[in-house]
Structure formats: C-alpha cells, structure tokens
Amino acid sequence: MLHTFVALVEDKPGVLTRVASLFRRLNINIVSLTVGHSEKVGVSRMTIVCDASPTAGHRIAASLYKLENVLQVDDVGQLSHVARELALIKVAATPKTRSMVFELVEVFRARIVDLAPESMMIEITGVESKIEGLIQVLNENGDRILEISRTGRMVMRRGQHTSRVLEAMRVPGLETPDELKAEEVGSASDVLMAEEAGLRD
Amino acid sequence: MAGKSRATNQKTEQAGGQPADGATNGTRLTGSEIIWATLDGEGVSVVFGYPGGAILPAYDALRKFPIRHVLVRHEQGAAHMADGYARASGKVGVAVATSGPGATNLVTGIATAMLDSVPMVCITGQVSSKVLGTDAFQEVDITGITLPVTKHNYVVTRAEDVAPVIREAFLVAKSGRPGPVLVDITKDAQQASAEFDFAAAAPKPHRPHPMLKTESASILQAAELIRSAKKPVILAGHGVLQSGAYAQVRTLAERMRIPVASTLLGLGGFPASHPLSLGMMGMHGEAWVNEAIQKADLLIACGMRFDDRVTGTLATYAPNAKKIHIEVDPAEINKNVKVDVALIGDLKEALEALLPHLAPRDAKGESAWVKEIEASKGECAVRDISNLPDSGHLYAAHVMHDLWRATEGKAIVVTDVGQHQMWEAQYYKHDEPRTLITSGGLGTMGFALPAAIGAKIACPDKEVWVIAGDGGFQMTAAELSTAAQEELDLNIAVVNNGYLGMVRQWQEFFYEKNYQSTPLLSPDFVKLAEAHGIRGKAVKTRAEVLSAVAEARGHQGPFLINFLVEKEDSVYPMIPAGSALHEMIRRPEKNPLVETARD
C-alpha cells in the first residue's frame, strides 16, 4: 500500500541522499518525493510517497528519525489531510484542434500557460486521480501528449496541527502564537473537512 | 618507541589549548590544532591512527597536545582498536586516517562498530576543498561510502566548523543507541585558522525524539504481564552493558525469580555464576536455554534486537510467549518479532520505572519453572571438565575452560569470529560486564588482535586475552608489531585447527563434507611472534595448557600461545540457519568435551 510521510529536514547538502538512501536500504520504492522550503529558515519539507507493506509505517518513520538531519516525521496516511499535485502537460495542438483542449481545460479547472503554433501547455493542480483523469481524456481524444512533468504528491494535515518538534527546538524564525499551541482543534478541523468534501475536485 | 613519543607529547603540551580548563576563549588556532584541542576537551587521551598526505597538518600539530597516538599497521586495525577501546571502557573510541585508501581501510571497522552499536568517532583527512570532486590524488567520497555504516557523518571544509562538528560527533556517537560517526576534514580546513572556544562549540541539545518515550500505561501493562507469567525468561542483550543496567536486570530477575538468557553481546551483563543465569541463547546456545525460550509464556527482551542468530526461524519462535521489548531504538520494535508491549527508552530508566510496580515473588523455594529448566539441563550441564581423563586430544573447549579457570574468569577476553568464538562463549564464564569483547553483528574476522590492543590500552591494569582462530588471526596479524611497539602486556591464544573451522563445520553439516577452500596453511605462529620480538609457545596436548597459560600470564609484555587443537571438531549444539530453536543438532552421545555426572 502507499504510505505518505512528511519529513522536516535540515536544509544542508547531502540530506536528500540520506533520506533516499534509507529507502534504498529498506528495499522500498519511492513513488514520489517533493522537497522545498518550509515555513522555517534552514528547514526543508519533504513529502515522500512510497509503496510498502501496511505495517511498514512505524519502522519507516522510526528509521527516518534515526537520521540526524531529520527533525520531524509525520505519517499522514491515516490522518485527515489535503493532498495536491501539480502537473505541466504539453500537448500537440494546431489552431484547428485547440478549442477541444480549451474545453477540457475548463472542465478540469486547469489553465493554459503556454500557446505555440503547434503545441499548448496545460497547468493542472489537484489530487493524483484528477491529473490522471485529464491525461486519460487527452489520450482518448487523440491529443498527442508531448511532455508531462509532475511534482509528485505534497500534503498538509488539516486543522491547526503544527510542528511540536520545531517549537521545542525554537528554530529561529518560528513564532508560536498561543492559540496555535493547541495541537488539534477538532471542531474547526471537522468544519474544514466538510467544506473540502464539497469542494473536492 | 611509543614511550619516547609520549614523552615528547608531554614536554610540549603547553603550546596547545587546554580547553578542559576553559581558558581558551578567543584563542586563535589552526584547524589542525582545533582537532586535537577539541578531542582533548572531550576527554580523549589516546587515538589510533595512521598518517598520510591529507591528514599531515593534523599530525604536525599533535605534538602540542597531551594525546597518545598509537600507530597501527593497517587502518582497519585503527577502527577495531577504537572499537575495542570503547567496548572495554564505555568511552568513545577515536580512530584517525588519511584520505582515500586510509579512509576506505577504516570501513570494515566502522561497519563492525555500527552493527554492534559501539560509540566511535573516526577522523579522516580529505583533499583540499578547492579540488573536492575532481578525483584528486587519494580523493575518495568517504562520507558517501560510509553513509549506510555510520550513525552519521560530516564533511568539514572550514576551520571554524572543526570544533562544533567534532563536539556534535561525540554527542551523536554516544547518545541514544550508540554508533560510529565519521568526520571528514579537508586539508585546507586543517591549515586555516579560526577562533577556538571549546565551550561555545558545544552542540545544541539533541532534537527531541517523539517516538522515544515510555508510556506509563505500557509500564503497567508490562508489570501485569510479568506478575501473571508462569514461565518468564529475561533476554539480556548488549543494551544491558550499554545502558549500565546490570543492577536493574539483576533486581528484576531475583525479585520475580526469572531466569536470564543472554545474547552473545549480552554475556557479562548478568553474572554467569548466578543461579538464575541460563547462559547464551541462539544458534550455539545450550539446549536448555533455547528450549526454555520455546516453552516460555513471557519473554522480557532487555536491550536486544531479536537477531536471526538468536531467533532461528521467526515463524516458530517462542510461539506461546507474550513479548515485552525494552529498547532504546524505536526502529527495532516489531522489526523481527512482533511484541505485545514495547517500552521505548533507556533500559536502565525503563527498568527503574517498571520495578516499583513489581512486588517480590515469594523468595523461598524456586518456582516450578526454574526447577523445570534445571531438570532439562541433564548431564551436559556439568561443565567442570577438569576431571576428564586426558584422551590425548587437545580440544579447543578445553583451552577455553582452562583459560577460564586460570584467569578465574576475570580477564577481558577479546575473540575473533568463528568456532573459537562460540566455544569461548560456552566455556568461559563471564561474571563481569565488558569482559567479553567480540564482533557479534557483523562477524568480522581479524577483529580480535586490534580490538584487544584497544581494550588493553583502555584498561592497562586488566589482564587481556586475545582468542583467535588461525584464519582470522592472519587477517590482522600485522598488528603484532603495534602490540610490540606499544609494549603491551597482552596474551594471545591462537586456536589453530588448520581450517577455517566454522565454515568447515557448515561444509560438514550442510555441504556433504566438501571442504572446498577451508584447509589453511599457516605460518609457524610462534616464529611469527618471535619475528616481532614477541615471546611464543606452541601447545599440542592438554597437559601443557595450564602451564603455558601460567607462563603467558607471568610474562611481562605480549605473549602468544599457538594451541594446535583437534582439526575437525565442531561446535555443538547448533541450530541450522533457518530452523526453529528447538530443532538443534545436539552433541554426539559420547562427547569428550563434556564431563557427565559419572566422571
């Protein structure tokens, strides 16, 4: 099954290798891995999706914690969260066939970000299934896909969950307003979930 | 020679920083000087190393500091010595090597320390930061190479980073589950200067580990399991030594009348002479130990990791037992064996939290369970073989047994890997912690001699014995020179059967006696010792063993005994790899090694 981890790591050379090497060592395939800056200076945020046995979550998280550069690990698989992926898709399209693509883009709430005489570039954001849906429809329509670039999944837990580890470390730049100290605000979270369910795309 | 260099160190030490005294605020030193000043501040008095181009600036500065340098003959030896030093003393061992081949030669020793969770810091020189990544002379990506076999590693390219990184390396090496850490320092970082302030370079507190906490509910659950168990067994591992939880494990065993089985690395953590001690479990553990585990209704695993050499096939391991796992590394929980209660944290602290919840079991009279185990021991438990008639054969087990009697079980014994290692574990009874030093997890042949040199330097007042086979001894025999140069009072027993014995045993049992590539021609080890200026003696009969051991013990300086033992002897009992714990190959009926009640 697919596991999703969010790892906050030190922004230093070689940290990505250490994380990736750990999955290699455990003989677990990484499905996607996104890295970028977090809200804290010097701390990067990774979202790692991997395919492993249902019981592997604990061991993967514990092994990640054994890496000195890893500050916090969250196994978000079982928790309520928002997951998104961004994709750029370049399709072959002439002035004659463009309008079809425009229609599809409209339906999928995607955007055209580049238009050339013989191609168009689509930007789409959403859960994986939505992106795969667009790709499938493009294929079925006979639009030739020239290139696809996907970011892989990035996730964030719902509600007012925040990083306890960063608080404890007092990482420079981290201000923790008192109202955020409550780790989970259940009711607010539920409301947001309900809203999101309606919006789910 | 060593004495001379030490004297030189002392004469000139005033030139260096004295960070331990805290008088170094704002001292400007070179990166090289900072290396030694920081090590000094961390309490390091000896390092094991080998100089070379990329680490030369550091060696040039060494004379200014009160640190003893032991020159090894191969960097693998340096890593094993630092490892043996750490295991004998409980302190962090330090190895130093140059870049490239010097660094790669450390790798086997680093992996050995990693698998056995030994705190060690390795410092390697590296080519100048300006040429990093250009395949410069003797450049190798040692942090890349050692990434999976170190707890953590660092590259240092600036002099100002030397002190903070080395200090953090020490913290990482000894905190939590200990392990080796490598610090790779470029030549230009050694040559540049920086302000040195030992106190200011202190590492920030280790980041909190949210998985590393023992829930009080789990403590209560564990206590309830222990109270209600009828057939409990304590499994004592290396963690008992690492955590220093001897008293707590003993209290738990005595208070609740629970027998204690040890892993190979756990030997010495619970006194072998204690009535509740069962001895070593696992592949070459005695039948009654493994049978007790198979019959148990509760296993209390203390600082051990259910290694495959301990469990046999997992499908049939202790099928009736609930399991409590007390372990400092959360990644070990449910890794091999699914447990019912996990107490995550330092073993000593966890046991101290647990013990108040356990009222003593009625102290008078052994429990039926302890009696049942006693009864299952049968004749093979009578282990004093001193009355056995001399059959004219010299068995390695006799050597171990006589060594144990002669040293009264008080020596530090450092073994290599193979048959002699298992015989040592079976026949030398360790009552004290840190008196058996052996490569358990990685099973590194060539470990014994260099690790014993480290152990002897850590504990100069203790009697130290190397026990090695003829195969493993030759892997690092060059370190005889190191022992001679350091004038170490080290006793070396080579258990020589002319085979790579354990491999031969597997060939006998599982490969139809196809002794492919296991017969081994060795040099005359006595002459080899003499070539190093080391006294030596060959022993061929059982009658000579005790007198040779006495001669070695009485001799000042290194002494080697070449025990020419029975060639095709095997270690019994044995659980074939992948079998269940109770499916063991038992000792042959008439075994000359075991004195029965009738003898």
Image (tube, rainbow, N blue to C red):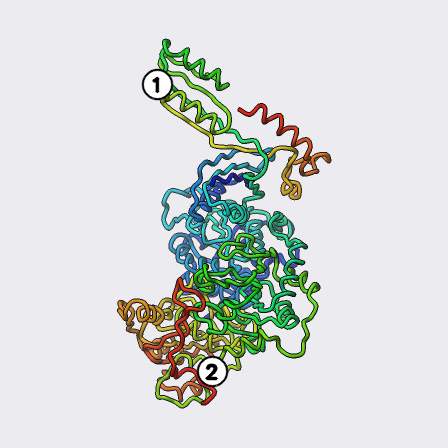
Q: Is residue B317 above or below residue B146?
A: below
The residue tagged 2 is B379
Q: CA distance from mark 2 to mark 1?
A: 83 Å
Quadrant of the rendered structure where residue B361 is?
A: bottom right
Q: Residue at x 64, y 63 (%)?
A: B351
Q: Residue at x 40, y 12 (%)?
A: A98
Q: Quadrant of the C terminus of chain B?
A: bottom left
The residue tagged 1 is A142
Q: Nearer the viewer, residue B151 or A185?
A: A185
Q: Nearer the viewer, residue A99 or B207?
A: A99
Residue B301 marker: none
Q: Quadrant of the N terminus of chain B?
A: bottom left
Q: Nearer the viewer, residue B513 or B26?
A: B513
At numbered mark 2, what does the secondary structure look like: helix, strand or loop? helix
At numbered mark 1, what does the secondary structure look like: helix, strand or loop? loop
Q: Position of residue B203 (x, y in %)?
A: 61, 50
Q: Chain of mark 1?
A: A
| Residue B449 in view, yes or no | no
Q: Is residue B226 left or right of residue B430?
A: right
Q: Are marks 2 and 1 in contact (CB under 8 Å)?
A: no
Q: Position of residue B138 (x, y in %)?
A: 37, 51
Q: Nearer the viewer, residue B243 or B109?
A: B243
